[in-house]
Amino acid sequence: MAVEYGINWAPDRLVTEVDVLIPTYGNYGAPHYTGGLIDPGYFVDVAPLDPLDALFKAHDFAYFAIPSTDVEALARSDLALISDIMALDDTQMGGEAHLYAAGAELALLYNVVENYGAGALLTPEQTVAIAADAANHLQLATIEPQGIAEQIGLAQILSQNDNVW
């Protein structure tokens, strides 16, 4: 069984992206979150907490080296992270890591296709495989907020969209 570090549900570890609260993962998982800091503007080099976090760290490092105008390189970096997540053995991840991995795969897939317009980089079979891997992670996922701050953060995230409930 993997060591469970989990999702950072606490309000001081939530990234606001287009008025949507996004929990962070470890020291590197989330948009604009690197080295345990929200939007520092530069890569922050600290130790990742687990294998999934290590993949997010490598992705952050790559992103900071790519010019923001090189959308194909950014899309390829996102696809590399998806591929690396898909290659992780399920035993290397706990329940919240599985949940975050599923969300990351789907968000990155959306980023590649919609935001970067790089859907041509994917075959239909690859898209189906990514969705299937995300579904597998969701089947293995758990939500385990630690302490009252994380419970409040989780409630904030879940209450963002009235259509969810």
Image (cartoon, rainbow, N blue to C red):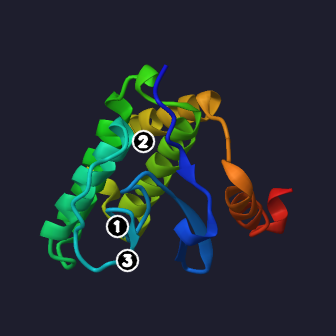
Q: Secondary structure at mark 1?
A: loop
Identify the mark nearer the N-term, 3 or 2. Answer: 3
The kind of residue tagged 2 is Thr
Give how far apart the Cα atoms at labels 3 and 2 are. Answer: 30 Å
Q: Position of residue 142 (x, y in %)?
A: 66, 36
Cα distance in 3D space between marks 1 and 3: 24 Å
Give the image quarter of residue 157: bottom right
- Residue 62: percent from left, percent from top: 18, 59
- Which residue is at a point 77% across and 61% down the rendered structure image? 155
Q: Identify which residue is drawn at 41% across, 55% down.
A: 29
| Front in this rendered view, residue 74 or 22 | 22
Q: What label does residue 127 carry, if any?
A: 2
Q: Nearer the viewer, residue 142 or 117?
A: 142
Going from N to C along the chain, the mark reached first, 1 or 2, is: 1
Which residue is disc 1 drawn over? 117
Q: Which residue is mark 3?
A: 39
Residue 138 appearing in the image: yes
